[in-house]
Amino acid sequence: MSGTNQPNCSNIHDFLLSGIPHLEDFNFWLGFLLISMYIVAVLGNATILYIIKVDQELHGPMYIFLFMLSAIDLSLATTTMPRMLGIFWMDDRKIAFDMCLIQMFFIHFLSALESGVLVAMAVDRYVAICHPLRYSSILTSEKICKMSALNLVRGALVMIPFPLIIKRLPYWKSNVLTHSFCVQQEAMNLACGDIKVNVIYGLFGILLVMGIDSLFICVSYVLIIRTVLGMVAETTTKTFSTCVAHICAVLVYYIPLIGLSVVHRLKTNRVPNLHILLGDVYLLIPPVINPLIYGIKTKQIRNRLKKLYRKIIH
Protein backbone atom coordinates (compact mmCIF):
# COMPACT_ATOMS: atom_id res chain seq x y z
CA MET A 1 0.00 0.00 0.00
CA SER A 2 1.34 3.44 -0.85
CA GLY A 3 0.41 6.91 0.16
CA THR A 4 -0.28 7.89 -3.45
CA ASN A 5 -3.07 5.33 -3.77
CA GLN A 6 -5.02 6.95 -0.97
CA PRO A 7 -4.49 10.74 -0.99
CA ASN A 8 -6.12 11.14 2.43
CA CYS A 9 -3.49 8.89 4.02
CA SER A 10 -0.02 10.00 5.05
CA ASN A 11 2.88 9.16 7.30
CA ILE A 12 2.73 10.85 10.72
CA HIS A 13 5.29 11.69 13.40
CA ASP A 14 2.96 12.57 16.25
CA PHE A 15 -0.58 12.25 17.56
CA LEU A 16 -2.87 14.95 18.90
CA LEU A 17 -4.61 14.06 22.14
CA SER A 18 -8.03 15.49 22.98
CA GLY A 19 -9.71 16.76 26.09
CA ILE A 20 -13.39 16.17 26.82
CA PRO A 21 -15.57 17.10 23.81
CA HIS A 22 -18.02 20.00 24.25
CA LEU A 23 -16.41 20.94 27.59
CA GLU A 24 -13.42 22.83 26.20
CA ASP A 25 -14.58 26.05 27.90
CA PHE A 26 -14.22 24.29 31.25
CA ASN A 27 -10.70 22.96 30.69
CA PHE A 28 -9.24 25.18 33.42
CA TRP A 29 -11.67 23.83 36.02
CA LEU A 30 -11.36 20.27 34.73
CA GLY A 31 -7.63 20.67 35.32
CA PHE A 32 -8.32 21.48 38.98
CA LEU A 33 -10.52 18.39 39.25
CA LEU A 34 -7.83 16.26 37.63
CA ILE A 35 -4.99 17.54 39.81
CA SER A 36 -7.19 17.03 42.90
CA MET A 37 -7.78 13.43 41.82
CA TYR A 38 -4.05 12.96 41.21
CA ILE A 39 -3.17 14.33 44.65
CA VAL A 40 -5.72 11.99 46.28
CA ALA A 41 -4.36 9.05 44.26
CA VAL A 42 -0.74 9.81 45.17
CA LEU A 43 -1.38 10.52 48.85
CA GLY A 44 -3.82 7.63 49.28
CA ASN A 45 -1.70 4.98 47.60
CA ALA A 46 1.58 6.29 49.05
CA THR A 47 0.04 6.20 52.54
CA ILE A 48 -1.05 2.58 52.14
CA LEU A 49 2.39 1.66 50.79
CA TYR A 50 4.05 3.36 53.78
CA ILE A 51 1.75 1.79 56.39
CA ILE A 52 2.18 -1.73 55.02
CA LYS A 53 5.95 -1.31 54.66
CA VAL A 54 6.63 -0.08 58.21
CA ASP A 55 4.11 -2.25 60.10
CA GLN A 56 5.37 -5.81 60.54
CA GLU A 57 1.87 -7.00 61.45
CA LEU A 58 0.70 -6.12 57.93
CA HIS A 59 3.19 -8.31 56.08
CA GLY A 60 0.69 -11.12 55.50
CA PRO A 61 -0.48 -12.22 52.01
CA MET A 62 -3.58 -10.00 51.97
CA TYR A 63 -1.55 -6.86 52.64
CA ILE A 64 1.25 -7.84 50.28
CA PHE A 65 -1.31 -8.01 47.48
CA LEU A 66 -2.77 -4.67 48.63
CA PHE A 67 0.76 -3.22 48.54
CA MET A 68 1.10 -4.41 44.92
CA LEU A 69 -2.30 -2.95 44.01
CA SER A 70 -1.40 0.46 45.46
CA ALA A 71 1.97 0.47 43.66
CA ILE A 72 0.27 -0.31 40.34
CA ASP A 73 -2.45 2.32 40.90
CA LEU A 74 0.20 4.92 41.74
CA SER A 75 2.11 4.06 38.54
CA LEU A 76 -1.06 4.11 36.42
CA ALA A 77 -2.09 7.52 37.77
CA THR A 78 1.40 8.91 37.05
CA THR A 79 1.34 7.46 33.53
CA THR A 80 -1.89 9.25 32.57
CA MET A 81 -2.87 12.17 34.80
CA PRO A 82 0.12 14.60 34.43
CA ARG A 83 -0.05 14.30 30.62
CA MET A 84 -3.79 14.98 30.73
CA LEU A 85 -3.20 18.02 32.91
CA GLY A 86 -1.02 19.46 30.15
CA ILE A 87 -3.99 19.21 27.77
CA PHE A 88 -6.43 20.96 30.12
CA TRP A 89 -4.15 23.73 31.39
CA MET A 90 -1.61 24.33 28.61
CA ASP A 91 -3.41 22.98 25.55
CA ASP A 92 -0.36 20.75 25.03
CA ARG A 93 -2.05 18.12 22.89
CA LYS A 94 0.85 16.92 20.76
CA ILE A 95 2.59 13.67 21.69
CA ALA A 96 5.37 12.09 19.62
CA PHE A 97 4.44 8.86 17.85
CA ASP A 98 6.95 6.76 19.79
CA MET A 99 6.03 8.38 23.12
CA CYS A 100 2.41 7.54 22.38
CA LEU A 101 3.38 3.91 21.86
CA ILE A 102 5.35 3.89 25.13
CA GLN A 103 2.37 5.34 27.03
CA MET A 104 0.13 2.80 25.29
CA PHE A 105 2.31 -0.08 26.47
CA PHE A 106 2.42 1.10 30.09
CA ILE A 107 -1.34 1.70 30.23
CA HIS A 108 -2.10 -1.80 28.93
CA PHE A 109 0.72 -3.43 30.93
CA LEU A 110 -0.26 -1.82 34.25
CA SER A 111 -3.92 -2.63 33.59
CA ALA A 112 -2.97 -6.28 33.05
CA LEU A 113 -0.95 -6.27 36.29
CA GLU A 114 -3.90 -4.78 38.20
CA SER A 115 -6.20 -7.46 36.83
CA GLY A 116 -3.74 -10.16 37.92
CA VAL A 117 -3.42 -8.70 41.43
CA LEU A 118 -7.22 -8.63 41.77
CA VAL A 119 -7.21 -12.36 40.94
CA ALA A 120 -4.52 -12.97 43.58
CA MET A 121 -6.62 -11.06 46.12
CA ALA A 122 -9.66 -13.19 45.21
CA VAL A 123 -7.57 -16.34 45.76
CA ASP A 124 -6.44 -14.92 49.11
CA ARG A 125 -10.06 -14.40 50.21
CA TYR A 126 -11.02 -17.88 48.96
CA VAL A 127 -8.24 -19.58 50.94
CA ALA A 128 -8.87 -17.45 54.06
CA ILE A 129 -12.59 -18.31 54.11
CA CYS A 130 -12.74 -21.81 52.62
CA HIS A 131 -9.46 -23.22 54.01
CA PRO A 132 -8.60 -21.05 57.04
CA LEU A 133 -6.52 -23.71 58.81
CA ARG A 134 -4.29 -24.13 55.75
CA TYR A 135 -4.04 -20.41 54.94
CA SER A 136 -0.41 -19.91 56.00
CA SER A 137 0.73 -23.17 54.40
CA ILE A 138 -0.98 -22.44 51.05
CA LEU A 139 -0.10 -18.77 50.63
CA THR A 140 3.59 -18.96 51.50
CA SER A 141 6.12 -16.26 50.59
CA GLU A 142 7.51 -18.51 47.86
CA LYS A 143 4.10 -18.98 46.23
CA ILE A 144 3.33 -15.26 46.44
CA CYS A 145 6.64 -14.52 44.69
CA LYS A 146 5.84 -17.07 41.96
CA MET A 147 2.35 -15.61 41.47
CA SER A 148 3.79 -12.09 41.23
CA ALA A 149 6.50 -13.16 38.76
CA LEU A 150 3.93 -14.98 36.62
CA ASN A 151 1.74 -11.88 36.61
CA LEU A 152 4.66 -9.67 35.50
CA VAL A 153 5.79 -12.06 32.76
CA ARG A 154 2.26 -12.60 31.46
CA GLY A 155 1.56 -8.85 31.39
CA ALA A 156 4.79 -8.09 29.54
CA LEU A 157 4.49 -10.91 26.99
CA VAL A 158 0.86 -10.14 26.16
CA MET A 159 1.13 -6.34 26.07
CA ILE A 160 4.49 -5.76 24.32
CA PRO A 161 3.02 -6.67 20.89
CA PHE A 162 0.34 -3.93 21.16
CA PRO A 163 2.61 -0.97 20.31
CA LEU A 164 4.63 -3.10 17.85
CA ILE A 165 1.62 -4.00 15.70
CA ILE A 166 0.58 -0.35 15.73
CA LYS A 167 4.07 0.79 14.67
CA ARG A 168 4.03 -1.52 11.62
CA LEU A 169 1.11 0.44 10.11
CA PRO A 170 2.67 2.88 7.58
CA TYR A 171 -0.10 5.36 6.72
CA TRP A 172 -2.81 7.11 8.70
CA LYS A 173 -6.13 8.81 7.95
CA SER A 174 -5.67 11.24 10.82
CA ASN A 175 -3.46 11.79 13.86
CA VAL A 176 -6.22 13.11 16.14
CA LEU A 177 -7.15 10.83 19.05
CA THR A 178 -10.42 11.42 20.87
CA HIS A 179 -8.98 10.22 24.18
CA SER A 180 -6.57 12.15 26.42
CA PHE A 181 -4.17 9.21 26.34
CA CYS A 182 -2.97 6.57 23.89
CA VAL A 183 -4.78 3.24 23.69
CA GLN A 184 -4.52 0.55 21.04
CA GLN A 185 -8.28 0.29 20.44
CA GLU A 186 -8.49 3.84 19.09
CA ALA A 187 -5.09 4.30 17.44
CA MET A 188 -5.57 1.30 15.15
CA ASN A 189 -8.83 2.74 13.78
CA LEU A 190 -6.93 5.76 12.41
CA ALA A 191 -4.69 3.59 10.23
CA CYS A 192 -5.16 3.19 6.48
CA GLY A 193 -3.61 -0.27 6.38
CA ASP A 194 -5.16 -3.64 7.13
CA ILE A 195 -5.84 -3.74 10.87
CA LYS A 196 -7.17 -7.31 11.00
CA VAL A 197 -4.09 -8.40 12.97
CA ASN A 198 -4.64 -5.59 15.48
CA VAL A 199 -8.31 -6.48 15.95
CA ILE A 200 -7.64 -10.21 16.37
CA TYR A 201 -4.69 -9.72 18.71
CA GLY A 202 -6.56 -7.08 20.71
CA LEU A 203 -9.41 -9.53 21.29
CA PHE A 204 -6.92 -12.29 22.09
CA GLY A 205 -5.09 -10.07 24.59
CA ILE A 206 -8.17 -8.97 26.49
CA LEU A 207 -9.55 -12.53 26.64
CA LEU A 208 -6.21 -13.99 27.73
CA VAL A 209 -5.77 -11.48 30.54
CA MET A 210 -9.00 -9.82 31.65
CA GLY A 211 -11.26 -12.59 30.37
CA ILE A 212 -9.48 -15.41 32.20
CA ASP A 213 -8.94 -13.23 35.28
CA SER A 214 -12.61 -12.30 35.56
CA LEU A 215 -13.52 -16.00 35.24
CA PHE A 216 -11.15 -16.93 38.08
CA ILE A 217 -12.58 -14.15 40.27
CA CYS A 218 -16.16 -15.31 39.60
CA VAL A 219 -15.28 -18.94 40.40
CA SER A 220 -13.53 -17.85 43.62
CA TYR A 221 -16.60 -15.97 44.80
CA VAL A 222 -18.97 -18.80 43.87
CA LEU A 223 -16.91 -21.07 46.14
CA ILE A 224 -16.75 -18.38 48.84
CA ILE A 225 -20.53 -17.84 48.77
CA ARG A 226 -21.13 -21.60 48.95
CA THR A 227 -18.88 -21.84 52.01
CA VAL A 228 -20.37 -18.74 53.70
CA LEU A 229 -23.94 -20.01 53.24
CA GLY A 230 -22.97 -23.15 55.13
CA MET A 231 -21.77 -21.20 58.14
CA VAL A 232 -23.64 -20.23 61.29
CA ALA A 233 -25.86 -17.18 60.64
CA GLU A 234 -23.99 -14.99 63.16
CA THR A 235 -20.67 -15.42 61.39
CA THR A 236 -21.95 -15.14 57.80
CA THR A 237 -22.09 -11.34 57.63
CA LYS A 238 -18.80 -10.90 59.50
CA THR A 239 -16.99 -13.37 57.23
CA PHE A 240 -18.34 -11.97 53.98
CA SER A 241 -17.59 -8.41 55.11
CA THR A 242 -13.88 -9.21 54.71
CA CYS A 243 -14.54 -9.41 50.95
CA VAL A 244 -16.41 -6.10 50.57
CA ALA A 245 -13.34 -3.97 49.80
CA HIS A 246 -12.10 -6.44 47.18
CA ILE A 247 -15.54 -6.74 45.55
CA CYS A 248 -15.73 -2.92 45.27
CA ALA A 249 -12.23 -2.80 43.71
CA VAL A 250 -13.21 -5.50 41.19
CA LEU A 251 -16.40 -3.67 40.20
CA VAL A 252 -14.59 -0.32 39.88
CA TYR A 253 -12.04 -1.95 37.58
CA TYR A 254 -14.11 -4.36 35.47
CA ILE A 255 -17.39 -2.51 34.84
CA PRO A 256 -15.79 0.41 32.90
CA LEU A 257 -13.37 -2.03 31.18
CA ILE A 258 -16.17 -4.24 29.90
CA GLY A 259 -18.19 -1.20 28.84
CA LEU A 260 -15.20 0.32 27.03
CA SER A 261 -14.43 -2.92 25.18
CA VAL A 262 -18.05 -3.31 24.08
CA VAL A 263 -18.36 0.31 22.91
CA HIS A 264 -15.10 0.17 20.89
CA ARG A 265 -16.17 -3.02 19.13
CA LEU A 266 -19.81 -2.15 18.50
CA LYS A 267 -18.92 1.44 17.48
CA THR A 268 -22.34 2.66 18.56
CA ASN A 269 -23.23 6.30 17.86
CA ARG A 270 -26.24 6.50 20.18
CA VAL A 271 -24.07 8.12 22.84
CA PRO A 272 -21.22 9.71 20.81
CA ASN A 273 -18.79 10.34 23.67
CA LEU A 274 -19.55 7.23 25.72
CA HIS A 275 -16.19 5.60 24.89
CA ILE A 276 -14.36 8.71 26.12
CA LEU A 277 -16.28 8.76 29.39
CA LEU A 278 -15.72 5.03 30.00
CA GLY A 279 -12.04 5.34 29.10
CA ASP A 280 -11.53 8.16 31.59
CA VAL A 281 -13.45 6.30 34.31
CA TYR A 282 -11.51 3.07 33.65
CA LEU A 283 -8.08 4.71 33.99
CA LEU A 284 -8.67 7.58 36.43
CA ILE A 285 -11.12 6.27 39.01
CA PRO A 286 -9.47 3.07 40.38
CA PRO A 287 -6.23 4.81 41.53
CA VAL A 288 -8.37 7.36 43.40
CA ILE A 289 -11.06 5.05 44.78
CA ASN A 290 -9.06 1.94 45.75
CA PRO A 291 -7.06 3.50 48.62
CA LEU A 292 -10.26 5.09 49.94
CA ILE A 293 -12.09 1.74 49.78
CA TYR A 294 -9.35 -0.14 51.61
CA GLY A 295 -8.76 2.72 54.05
CA ILE A 296 -12.43 2.69 55.07
CA LYS A 297 -13.32 -1.01 54.79
CA THR A 298 -10.15 -2.67 56.13
CA LYS A 299 -10.06 -2.45 59.91
CA GLN A 300 -6.29 -2.92 60.24
CA ILE A 301 -5.52 -0.21 57.66
CA ARG A 302 -8.08 2.09 59.25
CA ASN A 303 -6.53 1.67 62.70
CA ARG A 304 -3.03 2.36 61.36
CA LEU A 305 -4.32 5.47 59.59
CA LYS A 306 -5.75 6.75 62.87
CA LYS A 307 -2.43 6.17 64.62
CA LEU A 308 -0.55 7.89 61.79
CA TYR A 309 -2.93 10.86 61.94
CA ARG A 310 -2.51 11.22 65.70
CA LYS A 311 1.28 11.03 65.30
CA ILE A 312 1.23 13.79 62.65
CA ILE A 313 -0.99 16.22 64.60
CA HIS A 314 1.04 15.74 67.80
Image: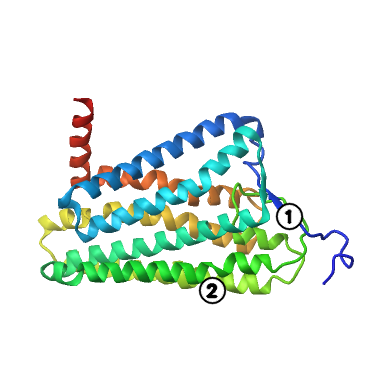
Q: Is residue 211 visible?
A: no
Q: Indicate the position of residue 277 as horizontal and vertical percent values.
A: 56, 47
Q: Tell whether 243 sits left or right of 195.
A: left
Assign the C terminus to one quadrant of the image: top left
The residue labelled by disc 2 is: 204
Give whichever of discs 1 and 2 has the lower sequence position: 1
Q: Indicate the position of residue 271 as horizontal and vertical percent values.
A: 63, 50
Q: Indicate the position of residue 272 as horizontal and vertical percent values.
A: 66, 49
Q: Residue at the location (23% across, 66% down)?
A: 126
Q: Kindly report which numbered mark, 1 or 2, lies closer to the viewer in this rendering.
A: 1
Q: Indicate the position of residue 97 as horizontal and vertical percent values.
A: 67, 55
The residue labelled by disc 1 is: 13
Q: In the figure, 228 relative to 303: above or below?
A: below
Q: Name the kind of residue labelled 1 in the image.
A: His
* Mark 1: few/some/many CA within 10 Å (<14, 14-19, 20+): few
Q: Secondary structure at mark 1?
A: loop
Number of on-image labels = 2
* Mark 2: few/some/many CA within 10 Å (<14, 14-19, 20+): few
Q: CA distance from mark 1 to mark 2?
A: 28 Å
